[in-house]
Image (cartoon, rainbow, N blue to C red):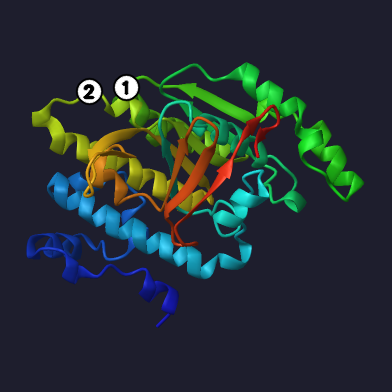
Amino acid sequence: MNSSLANDDLDLNIFDPYTQAALIRGGFLSSTNILKYTEAEFRKKVNLTVAATHSVFIAAANISASNVKCHKKPNNHELTTGCKQIDKLLGGGLFKYGITEISGESGCGKTQFCLQIALTVQLPLSLKGAKSGAAYICTEDRFPSSRIQQMISNIRFKYQCDSKIDMNELCLTDYGDNILISHIATVEDLKKCIHEMLPKALLHRPIKLIIIDSITAVFRGEYTLSEVPRRSRDLRDIAVFLHKLSVEHGLWIICVNQVTSSISDIGGNKLIPSLGLAWANLVTTRLMMSKTHSSRYIEVMFSPHTAPKSIPFRVTERGIE
């Protein structure tokens, strides 16, 4: 038997008997067959509950991501953050195939980080870029055009190429035109953007990075306490489809999260990422930014590529350094 096909098979034992029977009856025994559909389409085909459909999609997405890491690793590379110290912190840079979350309080540098990655993805391969564009989804403020223009004007000073060809490419790239910007205000609009607009854009434009700044904003006020289960389902729907896009198109995905106050075990309050376990369980790498009166820090909270650790950074005219 072909081992790659065997590795694509679902483990039916993790599902309840009804779900097992429905998957067998429909012939949906591999992640490849399942991820051809949206959750809504798949649910109608196999007649499962929303919760059961979510569990099947999460299992399928995890298998696909694992297979991509195993079979495509030679073609994979890390994307630089534009800061060598942060790249080292992350185990080499930002990794494809999964969701990288960056959380932190207001003004700590989350958007600055995202803007810089929207530029580094366009860098030559020799600088650990991807020579590709970015899709930037804004849910809170208008896209900071003046700030990114300031960063663009400093690119030739921030990065140095040994090759004249790469240096010309670095200086002549139209960075602003390579960022596809969308402004989203509601959960439904975000779901429509991810399920319909992004797949079309990925077919027609060389996009290798998706940024949602922030995932928290659209979920903050749309749900009552009685609608918490629906909120969790919507979060899972968005995360699972982002994982699917990441695997199918070889993307880097960054989602900005906010923080909330939590009572610490040792007394007092501490800041933790928002959106709870429903979201945390679907994030591949979680980064936290913080600031004091004199310093800013970026911390790896969890990642499959490196151990938890934090380092200081600063925001300059050139970007994150």
Of 254 and 205, nearer the camera is: 254
Marks 2,1: beta carbons within 8 A: yes
From what the image shows, is residue 182 above or below residue 91?
A: above
Tell me where residue 123 sits by quadrant.
top right
Of 299 and 55, nearer the camera is: 299
The quarter in which the N terminus is drawn is bottom left
SS under mark 1: loop
User: Mark 1 belongs to which amino acid?
Assistant: Thr
Residue 34 placed where, x, y %?
31, 55
Q: Which label is found at residue 246? A: none
Residue 208 placed where, x, y %?
58, 43
Mark pair 2, 1: CA separation? 8 Å
> Are there few (<14), some (14-19), or many (20+) residues within 10 Å of tag 1?
some
Q: Is residue 33 visible?
A: no
Residue 286 placed where, x, y %?
41, 48
Q: Is residue 273 visible?
A: yes
Which residue does the image show at 41% across and 20% down from the upper left?
Answer: 140
Number of numbered discs present?
A: 2
Q: Which label is found at residue 222? A: 2
Residue indicated by mark 1? 186
Of 309 and 36, nearer the camera is: 309
Question: Furthest-right residue in view?
Answer: 164
The quarter in which the C terminus is drawn is top right
User: Mark 2 belongs to which amino acid?
Assistant: Glu
